[in-house]
Image (tube, rainbow, N blue to C red):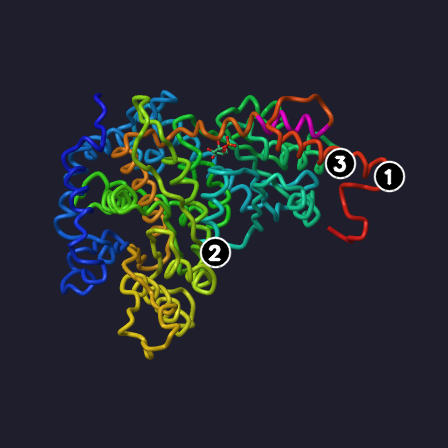
């Protein structure tokens, strides 16, 4: 299929002309137009997508939709949902949507595998819940430790935080992602080896952080149980490399599948989501899948002009490629959604943070912006100063819920007021005329330029379904943007070099060999190694400050 270079598409040229039209109305002026909310806000299922605070006019929206047509978004969407090889650099399909599809709608090639895995997951969860699965001394499991990182961690951890209201409370679920021993040591010290189940989640089963934590957990258990057979009662794995899991010591029947055709950052719908199933139960897990499935259907069927992921993708392109916003903040006005930004950071930047197009040519235009943000309204008392008066040109997503699930309406209204006031202030700013004392010699310091674009996403209420809709909205936004930029969102070759160097440097820090490094890295290795051996020779312990007590 010939590549459609985005900048050569006629709509791209139109958008460039529209963006350069500095005589046109400012965002602040646009914001005053009557009927704007009705024209630029869109609803699907439990989601409202308000683009009325974007620098959009009907002409811009038309040109963006023309761009979507010319880039063949409809064809690209079909290819994804049909199970075509949309990940050519790794020679695979990307079938995360099949994981949540109805069985009759799944590509037949993966249908049986998915159903078998789902049945295995459900049976395991039921055994654990009913106390049929017990620890090696016959005690019921109380703590589940999910060991995994990146896509094997961020989705389940985010969703579990978001669905705390649905948590049955049957298990304490812990997540161990980083290799930092402070975390591992403290967590293990809090656990009972007779009642703890470890789930090792790694598609490749070779990720350093996961492997090191898994080895430490295995030693911890073996030291306390003195019995290798105990591993079978305390370790599960979710992986696309079952042999490696078995070599690690995990019983074959305790290995759940992952597949090459599901990317890590798209995998929470698979057995990677096992801790979710354990925490919120099978009904809520199915509801999460159903929400995402409804969004898949919306993506497939809604016209481009009403299609939420397409619109969100186009707005991102407009801001970053035409209006120069290379930083994008996602601000979450719901404590339960506080991990959304971390999740999206991987989803968006690991998918589209690339420069080389599918045909090997280099993209001359920016692709995904820096993505950051977090839980609000905390940022209002921290970095919002920069949002309003700083020099960084950025765009924002505000995410909030219409209804809360607590009995403190005053809190909820203040939270919503915080969200809406921030997006309004960013849009309209504050001019000299609007100041109480415009003659004040320092008045200029109180001016707010405004004209900063944002999108508001309102979930009707945070439920498993609406969360499924929201996550799939962003998944598909990322895919639609990749179709316009003509890059492969499903590989991540950029992370490989760091992994190779980490192995080499780890060996050097442990005293083995010397490789060639730049001056800074070589100097730092020497410094860390020399200081470590000095501390050892002085008879001290370099691992823990002896003046600190406890863990
Ligand atoms: O290093 C990046 C990455 O490969 C991510 O793409 C992935 O989600 C994460 O590491 C974890 O990988 P794995 O599931 O193979 O341990």
189 versus 202 height, above or below: below
Task: Estimate the spatial distance between the alpha carbons at disc 3 and disc 1, rounded to whole Å.
Answer: 30 Å
Q: Which residue is under mark 1?
A: 538
Range covered by the magenta-colored residues: 501-510
Marks 3 and 1 in Cβ contact (< 8 Å): no
489 versus 188 height, above or below: above
Residue at 26% across, 47% down: 323
Task: Estimate the spatial distance between the alpha carbons at disc 3 and disc 2, rounded to whole Å.
Answer: 34 Å
Marks 2 and 1 in Cβ contact (< 8 Å): no
Horizontal and vertical percent position of residue 193: 69, 43
Horizontal and vertical percent position of residue 526: 71, 31
Residue 146 is drawn in which quadrant? top right
Main SS class of the magenta portion in the image = helix
Does any portion of residue 145 appear in the rendered image? yes
Q: Which mark is residue 223?
A: 3
Q: Earlier in the sequence, mark 3 or mark 1?
A: 3
489 versus 244 height, above or below: below
Task: Estimate the spatial distance between the alpha carbons at disc 2 and disc 1, rounded to whole Å.
Answer: 50 Å
Asked whether 131 falls inside the magenta stretch, the response is: no
Residue 41 is drawn in which quadrant? bottom left
Horizontal and vertical percent position of residue 315: 25, 47
Asked if ligand 1 lies within 8 A of label 1, the reply is no
Asked whether 509 falls inside the magenta stretch, the response is: yes
Q: Nearer the viewer, residue 514 or 103?
A: 514
Q: Earlier in the sequence, mark 2 or mark 1?
A: 2
Q: Which mark is residue 164?
A: 2
Dot 2 falls on a residue whose secondary structure is helix
């Amino acid at each position: 299929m010939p590549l459609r270079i985005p900048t050569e598409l006629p709509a791209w040229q139109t958008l460039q002309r529209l963006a350069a039209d500095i005589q046109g109305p400012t965002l602040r002026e646009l914001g005053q137009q009557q009927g704007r909310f009705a024209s630029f806000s869109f609803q699907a299922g439990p989601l409202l997508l308000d683009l009325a605070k974007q620098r959009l006019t009907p002409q811009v929206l038309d040109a963006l939709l023309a761009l979507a047509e010319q880039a063949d978004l409809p064809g690209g969407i079909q290819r994804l949902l049909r199970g075509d090889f949309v990940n050519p650099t790794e020679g695979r399909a990307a079938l995360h949507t099949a994981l949540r599809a109805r069985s009759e709608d799944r590509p037949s090639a993966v249908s049986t595998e998915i159903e078998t895995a789902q049945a295995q997951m459900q049976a395991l969860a039921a055994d654990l819940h009913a106390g049929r699965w017990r620890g090696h001394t016959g005690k019921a499991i109380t703590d589940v430790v999910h060991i995994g990182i990146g896509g094997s961690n961020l989705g389940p951890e985010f969703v579990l935080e978001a669905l705390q209201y649905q948590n049955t409370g049957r298990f304490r679920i812990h997540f161990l992602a980083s290799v930092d021993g402070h975390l591992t040591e403290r967590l293990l010290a809090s656990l009972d080896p007779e009642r703890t189940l470890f789930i090792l989640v790694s598609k490749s089963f070779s990720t350093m952080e996961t492997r090191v934590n898994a080895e430490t957990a295995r030693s911890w258990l073996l030291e306390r149980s003195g019995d290798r057979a105990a591993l079978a009662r305390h370790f599960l794995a979710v992986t696309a490399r079952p042999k490696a899991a078995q070599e690690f010591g995990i019983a074959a029947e305790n290995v759940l599948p992952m597949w090459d055709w599901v990317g890590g950052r798209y995998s929470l719908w698979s057995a990677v989501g096992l801790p979710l199933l354990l925490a919120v139960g099978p009904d809520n897990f199915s509801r999460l899948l159903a929400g995402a499935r409804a969004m898949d259907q919306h993506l497939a069927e809604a016209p481009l002009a009403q299609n939420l992921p397409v619109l969100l993708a186009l707005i991102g392109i407009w801001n970053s490629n035409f209006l120069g916003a290379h930083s994008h903040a996602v601000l979450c006005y719901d404590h339960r959604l506080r991990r959304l930004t971390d999740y999206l950071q991987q989803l968006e930047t690991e998918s589209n943070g690339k420069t080389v197009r599918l045909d090997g040519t280099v993209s001359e235009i920016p692709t995904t912006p820096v993505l950051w943000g977090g839980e609000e309204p905390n940022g209002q008392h921290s970095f919002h100063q920069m949002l309003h008066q700083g020099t960084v040109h950025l765009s924002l997503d505000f995410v909030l819920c219409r209804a809360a699930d607590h009995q403190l309406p005053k809190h909820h209204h203040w939270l919503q007021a915080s969200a809406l006031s921030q997006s309004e202030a960013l849009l309209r700013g504050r001019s000299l005329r609007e100041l109480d004392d415009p003659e004040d010699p320092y008045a200029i310091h109180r001016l707010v330029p405004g004209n900063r674009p944002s999108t508001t996403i309102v979930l009707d209420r945070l439920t498993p379904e609406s969360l499924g809709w929201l996550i799939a909205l962003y998944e598909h936004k990322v895919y639609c943007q990749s179709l316009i930029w003509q890059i492969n969102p499903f590989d991540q070759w950029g992370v490989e070099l760091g992994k190779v160097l980490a192995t080499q440097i780890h060996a050097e820090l442990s005293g083995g060999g010397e490789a060639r490094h730049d001056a800074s890295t070589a100097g730092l290795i020497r410094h860390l190694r020399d200081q470590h051996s000095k501390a050892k020779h002085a008879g001290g312990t370099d691992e823990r400050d002896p003046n600190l007590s406890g863990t």
